[in-house]
């Protein structure tokens, strides 16, 4: 097995985008609990995201969600982010909270509503131009609740048409990333329910269209790392939305429910070239912190990704290939597990210190007083939420 | 197979409670869509529930949810319901929307919060006294999101203690009905996740404690009718929360996702004596109408239950038993399916007319002008919602 | 809604292939139960398949499985089938029962074993030439049980290469149909686990390569009819393997576990043009009759498909489209359900009689004496089984 | 966190029963692959089980399965086991492989077949007397494949009666342990599908009746450690069948699919007193080694259990309780994860050496020549299999 030292340089370029909405309040359909210190403005969300980066060195970009993060002056927002030490990352569109979208957006049977949804995406492209963001991420809530309610086939065709209209406006260095999800908020059919559908839709668009894999958006017992491997093989893995799940789209802290799955996913990322600095794969969190504090929840999350990346990089791939080639089932499995069971945390603490970062970002944050400051300062106003 | 005529009298005593919250706005964590005509007061919810009963003859009771349906004067509310032609049914408690309950209610590690949750239930008992309601239904949102977050074992013991405190205050003719649910809003562990847990908790309380089976609260591929049969066998099936699901706790219109499952459930209800007029099993809807109109959604739901009950009553049980006894697998299955495939809708239309009800409650409602009236009248105020 | 009469002509061209292996013994890993009358030869299997066609008019072809159904003289076998009144249908390959395939076939890391698996398929092509069969159906058992055991990515590339080698030998009027399955017999990863993978593999081959959809091969809660619609939209739905499931790949009688799902699937088939006589979609059963009699099990199965096809054809598509276009959720759902709830069985009985078939194929078979004859005659020899 | 040294003594009493059938050939319904060296006799299976114990010190007992392991002289078999250094453990009954049990055993509608199934269990009790085994483990394959095929309610009553008849013959120091399983080999209903059913059945019998929890026998997304905690709380956790799963009852090597789940399970075992030397909880493997070598497969399995037990023992329970009591969600989770992420393997290697065991049982076995010897010696005869 490689030593930590042998792989440690590869950790230097790791970057995980954090979502602006993780710093606002979130919850379930039953209740959204508020919490002290929650941002009231986009700027406060960016400040919190920057804190995550300061303590970890892992989160140099913050993803925005439109219209939640709309501002008058995007140049100013971009400058503000830069001052805080982070950049604006992926722009996420939203066609699920306007009343017009009750029965769909880009797939709607009414051309006027489709046009409205398309125009919303064109506005997102303008925001990308203004912020220097390269990726437009589209997650569709479109679907239906009752058999017969909608014509699934026509909706698929309308989706293709709507996406093509948006795609046509992309600049050369911009990408459209289409996210799939098996269910919720629609409970009978979803218009982009699986990676196959996302793939055929983006293949029809062109080379700047990619698939986003959200780790919580699959049916029970789906082998997610297989999909990672397949999308990398096809050159269409655009980005990850990391989170963790026991049941449905739980949006828990990545790695908290099944750390071994996160290891397997990161192994396939490395195996398929997705971890290379120029791979074009964007790594993002997409999580809710319903009961835990939000900033430490994000710190824990990027650390979990880093720890599993280190383990994945430490797999002895030569020994693995040799055992696989020999048909040695238990031997190959053991080589694989050796890396997973290795405790990389002390080495990572040293690695951090050698780069001017705190050995324990969780403890450093707790001791920094940042949380107390925002809880004291952010009084009044309206806490942001979904 | 029995003729419809032979079973039609058994349909006369069918009663399905409707939930007050079905008439308010509901939705997903992503969005709650409003709709014209949505009630602003408990009274308007009761009026809508009464409309469902008027058009179907199936829904003589309306379940309340506390504190959503709190009023100053329950005697007046009860009288109002009676004027409208319905009664107050089950009282549902709520320990998931107050900030104090973020980490639990009846199971909370803090005795002060447990006491608050217990007191809320004692208040519900007072409302039952005031409204003549007989059942206190308890659905717990209690659980945890992260392994290690909570001590599952202690919480189970604290739950037993809290329930015993509430149970001690029940009047002789009142019941405590405990509902289980596999997940949501908690995503790692839920304190009452399955019928087994609900059963051992109610058995520890006494004979007035029962289990509530919500048809959408199980893991994928659970055989729900088996649980119905088992709980009836054990004398602990207190009530049903009817709804329908493709994925999780979708809360769709009962019978819309898997009508055959509803048939199988109603067959076991009949088989196990749960349909007898004095069985003590309360049949309720617990649904959300996120994209469809609410009152016709409820009408459709009670009709679905009625149609499947008729089919279940029409199973030729003698022929079925004979085929089962002969080990005739296909023969027994065919006897069972014969009843399911029989189209009882024309007979039910005639049955309704013979009892002074509209042949088609859906059409009669649409033509009644009720929807237009409430949409016109209910302007201003705040639409009720979860 | 159209009358049965209006749609009855469309039933005339319905044809459902039956699998030769359905007539042999099958079971679970725990036990394969034998049964009286089970075929000892391919000819006896064909005779039983022909009986299914005689009583139903629905099953003019029988699919073979190689090597289970290997014979010396395929011309003679084809002639024998013709005498019995049926044709040879799809040829199914088998690379899961030879010891060499323990760790894979077309994806194996050892080129010698891949070559052996490829050669097996070339032999199947020769059998197709000899029998006039047009479709080569490939279901791969390839996969792995333990993380690290195999290199998923290389296996995907080797699969592409192996399939291309086979595809190159297809005659102009022959097709390669690739089947996917989420799991079993492999329990960690499967090399063709989902429709997306099957699609990208067949798209890489050419226009004569298609996807086979087995209705039992999906993760829990997958919307199967959506995949039907999508594959038809893409022109890549080659064939169906019909069966039914409550849990995993149960291989129950089609329509027995979720008749409404079968209705929804047949509706999308019709909607997407897959039911047209020249659609190129082959409809097949792929079932096990572990506890029920095999021939009536097959009769019941083709009847279930026919009954649901009739219902699907009876959907009032104009009313449906109007309601969908109006955003009338409950109205559209009701139009859809109207067809499902219509009892087409009496009309189908009359339709059969008008075509010289027995009104009740199940009863006619039971009264025909065929079962008694085979049970008496087929004594000695070795009953065929998986 | 406790040091390894502080918990190492608690590892001394750990004992994991191995199943005799793990050493025979096993597989799926598609194929059972043979392998060199597979036992032809019960004695050879016991010899292999003893090898697992010799290399690990963890597996002092071997469970038998009747009739697979029937012999003429059980005293001689017991003596043979003792010579090899192991004892006979749990006796497992089998009512799923005789033709009479096609439609059930202890629940069968025919009293003659129920009697036969009961008598089989009485024979198992005699074998327990002869071998000194204390536990009779009952896993029922009983169930049905088609709705209507069987009367679930009567079967539950007949099961209660059959079990009572068997229970009445238990000696004072013997136990009946009832195993539940959600599905397979039955695909519609299973007579003991869940822990709730197993519990109510054993509670009706008496104090010597317990529940067996097989870690692979649950619906997708079931929280297994919750059930562990609940059954321990109720004093009814009799035994574990350890294995691992990605999909259904995969019977993979315990800990290979989700090592974190195994950790959580062992934590609840310790938390609930189930790991105490006198807890009465029997820990067993129940696995299939379809593609890997069997003896090293078993060695890997008991090591996995040991490693996770060590981690579970190392959880800092005081810090955990303090964080839980403070409502510190992330803090409590981190305390929990700290133990999981700790690499105990070097300490365990030292622990083994200090007790005269090989530091690496896997390597020691590979270098011992045992495998080569049995492959050379066990030629001819019939390899044992399910």
Image (cartoon, coloured by chain):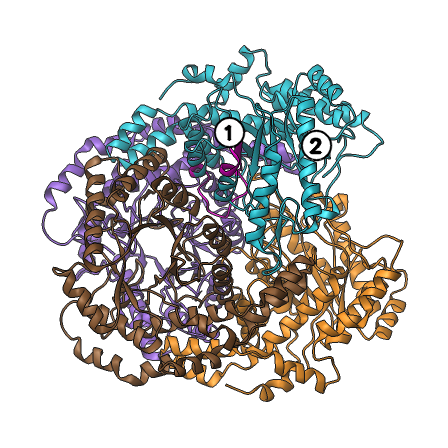
Chain colours: A orange, B cyan, C purple, D brown
Identify the image quadrant of residue C181.
bottom left
Give coordinates of residue B69: x percent, y percent: 73, 31
Nearer the observer: mark 1 or 2; the answer is 2
The residue under label 2 is B123
Are the residues under badges 1 and 2 in a single subunit?
no
Q: Residue at x 60, y 32 (%)?
A: B168
Helix, strand or loop for disc 2: helix
Q: Which residue is mark 1?
A: C2
- Front residue (pair C228, D89): D89
**Nearer-the-camera pick, B290 or B286:** B286
- The stretch of residues the image draws in magenta is B202-226
Quadrant in which the N terminus of chain D appears? bottom right
Instruction: Locate residue A342, reporting x and y percent.
Output: 53, 79
* Residue that appears at 35% across and 24% down: B316
**x then y, percent, for residue A161:** 67, 55
Q: Nearer the viewer, residue B57 or D203?
A: D203
Q: Chain of mark 1?
A: C
- Where is residue D80 shown, x and y percent of the image? 18, 69
Is C65 located above or below residue C7 in the figure? below
Horizontal relation, residue C361 to residue A35: left or right: left
Vertically, is C86 above or below C345? below
Marks 1 and 2 sit apart, C-alpha to C-alpha, by 56 Å
């Amino acid at each position: 097995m490689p030593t930590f030292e042998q792989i440690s340089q590869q950790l230097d370029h790791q970057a995980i985008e954090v979502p602006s909405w993780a710093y606002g309040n979130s919850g379930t359909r039953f209740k959204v609990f508020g919490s002290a210190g929650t941002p009231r403005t986009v700027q406060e969300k960016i400040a919190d995201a920057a804190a995550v980066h300061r303590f970890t060195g892992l989160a140099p970009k913050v993803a925005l969600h439109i219209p939640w993060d709309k501002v008058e002056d995007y140049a100013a927002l971009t400058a503000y982010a830069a001052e805080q030490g982070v950049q604006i990352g992926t722009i996420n569109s939203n066609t699920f909270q306007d009343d017009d979208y009750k029965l769909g957006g880009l797939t709607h049977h009414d051309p006027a509503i489709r046009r409205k949804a398309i125009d919303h995406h064109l506005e997102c492209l303008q925001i990308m131009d203004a912020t220097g963001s390269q990726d437009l991420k589209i997650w569709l809530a479109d679907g239906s609740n009752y058999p017969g309610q909608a014509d699934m086939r026509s909706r698929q065709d309308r989706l293709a048409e709507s996406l093509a209209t948006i795609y046509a406006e992309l600049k050369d260095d911009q990408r459209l990333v289409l996210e799939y999800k098996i269910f919720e908020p629609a409970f009978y059919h979803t218009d982009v329910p699986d990676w196959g559908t996302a793939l055929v839709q983006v293949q029809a668009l062109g080379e700047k269209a990619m698939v986003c894999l959200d780790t919580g958006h699959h049916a029970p017992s789906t082998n997610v790392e297989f999909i990672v491997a397949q999308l990398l093989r096809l050159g269409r893995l655009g980005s990850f939305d990391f989170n963790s799940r026991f049941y449905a789209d739980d949006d828990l802290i990545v790695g908290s429910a099944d750390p071994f799955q996160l290891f397997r996913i990161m192994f396939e990322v490395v195996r398929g070239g997705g971890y290379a600095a120029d791979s074009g794969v964007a790594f993002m969190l997409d999580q809710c912190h319903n009961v835990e504090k939000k900033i430490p929840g994000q710190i824990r999350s990027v650390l979990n990704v880093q720890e599993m990346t280190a383990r994945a990089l430490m797999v002895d791939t030569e020994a693995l290939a040799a055992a696989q080639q020999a048909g040695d089932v238990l031997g190959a499995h053991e080589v694989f597990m050796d890396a997973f069971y290795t405790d990389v945390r002390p080495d990572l603490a040293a690695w951090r210190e050698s780069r001017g970062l705190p050995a324990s970002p969780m403890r450093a944050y707790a001791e920094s007083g940042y949380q107390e400051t925002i809880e004291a300062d952010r009084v009044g106003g309206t806490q942001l939420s979904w």
